[in-house]
Image (tube, coloured by chain):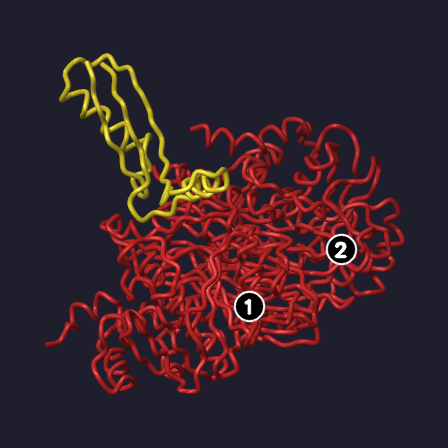
Amino acid sequence: MKARIHVTLKNGVLDPQGKAIEHTLGSLGFDGVNEARQGKFIELDIQETDEAKARETVTAMCEKLLANTVIENYSIDLEQ
Amino acid sequence: MSEITPEIVAEHGINEEEYALVLEIMGREPNLLELGIFSVMWSEHCSYKSSKKWLKTLPTEGPQVIMGPGENAGVIDIGDGNAAIFKMESHNHPSFIEPYQGAATGVGGILRDVFTMGARPIANVNALRFGEPDHPKTRHLVSGVVAGVGGYGNCVGVPTVAGEVEFDPSYNGNILVNAMTVGLAKADRIFTAQASGVGNPVVYVGSKTGRDGIHGATMASAEFDDASDEKRPTVQVGDPFTEKLLIEACLELMQTDAIVAIQDMGAAGLTSSSFEMASSGDMGVELDLDQVPQREEGMTPYEMMLSESQERMLIILKPGKEDLARSIMEKWDLDFAVIGKLTDSKRMVLKFHGDVVGDLPIKPLAHHSPEYDRPWVPTPDSKDVLASDISEAADTTDALKTLMSSPNMSSRRWVWEQYDHMVMGDTIQRPGGDAGVVRVHGTNRALAVTSDCTPRYCKANPVRGGAQAVAETYRNITAVGATPLAITDNMNFGNPERPEIMGQFVGCIEGMRDACLALDYPVVSGNVSLYNETNGKGILPTPVIGGVGLIKDSDKTATVAFGSENESLVLIGDSIGHVGMSIYLDVIEGRREGNAPIVDLAAERKNGEFVRSQIEAGFVESCHDLSDGGLAAAVADMVIASNMGAEVIKPADVETPTTAWLFGEDQGRYLISIGDAESLLEAAEEAGVSAVVVGRTGGNDLTLPGGSTISVAELRECNEAWMPNYMAG
């Protein structure tokens, strides 16, 4: 099973990298970008076939390692 | 209808008595915004309400002092028309909650305190204290804090040249992250936060305001309990690249004559900066909060006034200088906004969407904050452990090996290698020696900087411990050949409402005061962090001292590395073999007992002046102060640093048992290596300084009295292995 995880900064948390993207897009002439927020995308190939169990495991992975839950949110998509 | 319930007052950390004072000052019930402002201004962090009474007793003056406590940082004269500006500040609570960002923003905050006064930051120092290595959180916290210090300091381009890392179970739930910055300015171009000139524009520069760290200042003064995870969203995120722009933009603006007053927005952000500036100039302020650059939509006045978004400054400009300032800030890609003006009302008037949303008197809030004379009890005397009370080590080099590979004695190379200590190109001595040394750019002068504290001494005997912390920085600065000039202090303690904790605070201050007076070494800035407790258990009393000294000729310094083979090792200072509260007793015998060593301040000064004169005269090949682990640990450090062996010989007339002589922690001592010991001994005798030859350099082994031997390679290996092995987990 494939698990696709998006990790993004929580609302309101300053995103210096996003700010740099927004700024650079502007200086390259891409007008009209109001805001840029960036995050990371992680894809895992896991052995588990039961979706509920897989979600539970991947959630634990996010909580322990993949996301810094103090300042980040995560979302998980599973695909058989 | 009242929006202010007792619950809301309590949530703001204001007690009943204080709230009565709020009502008296306001002459009416405050609204939520006003209450929030009282809350942050009167937090322990901003108001020093428990500590003020005692801090006032510290000596703060001297011919070298240009500005003492009260400004953003202390300023001292370093000759040639230059001034050094420095301060240390804690970021303990935020670093426990989010170690990387907490430490990073701690570094950012202290940098701003220094460059806001017109100085270019030239050195950073970090004093870090963590829980016991085996505690489940410790490794994660060490890793995050060290990365955060490095991440911010390295990106902003200021070298981290000194610091300390210590482990102790008392910090399990309350780590200490104390960051210090030293900056360089022209002595006649110092900027202050004193507002003046009715009608002068109040401008905001830097990053936009978001909802970061709302109530960070009140959080920093609250005890943790197990539910403090709830407090997490208040953590702010640092952006060192913006800080770098802000440094350059502010220093450029300071080259013009546009600035009346300038202040960084630190804890309690816009509130504390605007109140402090208006209060020190006895002015009023009118702010139009609609003009504040905002990162998020729908921000309320409460959020704007209390936000702790990073990398922001508040400036009072001279009239008509707005366009000049705007063009500089916009050149550096920073936000610029005129958000208000100075008035003569002596009140803070806050407007939002055209309405007055807050109206508070400035002086009473800023200067008449509550001041407590908290009850305190002196720390009871501890029964001392005598040299004769400990058993002789079966094998002294085995004991030394155990000591040098213990968590608190092992090499910190793993830590400081993550810090850029060479950026700016003026670092003369890197971390790992007694003090960091940075050249005063473009001159032959240099500054020596260090931080020190021995909390286990402070616990056993706060008065001695306070004096020892000051004296150890004096010694570290002296050991590189510098003249100690002044200190900054970072007082980290538990809950001051407990008399025994308050007693520790009072005792440490007394010891610091004695030492500062005896050594002509005043306090020019500082910070207090109280309530470092979890579930009612306080940390060891930890008054961290940051010292700064001056080297007039940077060619005449000393390091801890021997010059060559066959130099004599000369021990300066008296050794009686004080083993109480020593690292040896703790690590080898598993006893943390006894009293802290006495600091003989007259001898401290005499010995220091003697050592300095010998280094300045160019006689000394290497020099190291004696601290944790005594003579044996000092020799071990020197042997490792020089990659050369040495033999330690106990003079025949010394009656102290060998183990206590080697590992005792008597104060005021230095170990020097020198080619011609005879003339040094003569000079010492003339100066009334105790000096004795205790060995010589050479070979590939370290040999201790009795013939016990360890190779330099093995000693280095055991000293350097612990930290990386521990972190690899």
Q: Earlier in the sequence, mark 2 or mark 1?
A: 2
Place of residue B612 in the rendered image (x, y in percent of width and height, measured from the top left): 77, 59
Q: Position of residue A48 (x, y in %)?
A: 20, 14
Residue B341 relative to residue A39: left or right: right
Both labels 2 and 1 in a single chain: yes
Question: In this view of the protein, which residue sits in the foreground, B272 or B667?
Answer: B272
According to the colouring, which chain is red? B
**Which residue position is annotated with label 1?**
B525
- Tell me the residue at 64%/54% (across/down): B122
Position in image of residue B539 (x %, y %): 39, 55
**Mark 1 residue type:** Ser
Residue B409: quadrant of the picture: top right
Which disc, if any, is residue B481? 2
| Chain shown in yellow | A
Q: In the rendered image of this protein, does residue B46 appear above or below residue B552?
A: below
Q: Nearer the viewer, mark 2 or mark 1?
A: 1
Q: On the rendered image, what quadrant is the C terminus of chain B found in?
A: top left
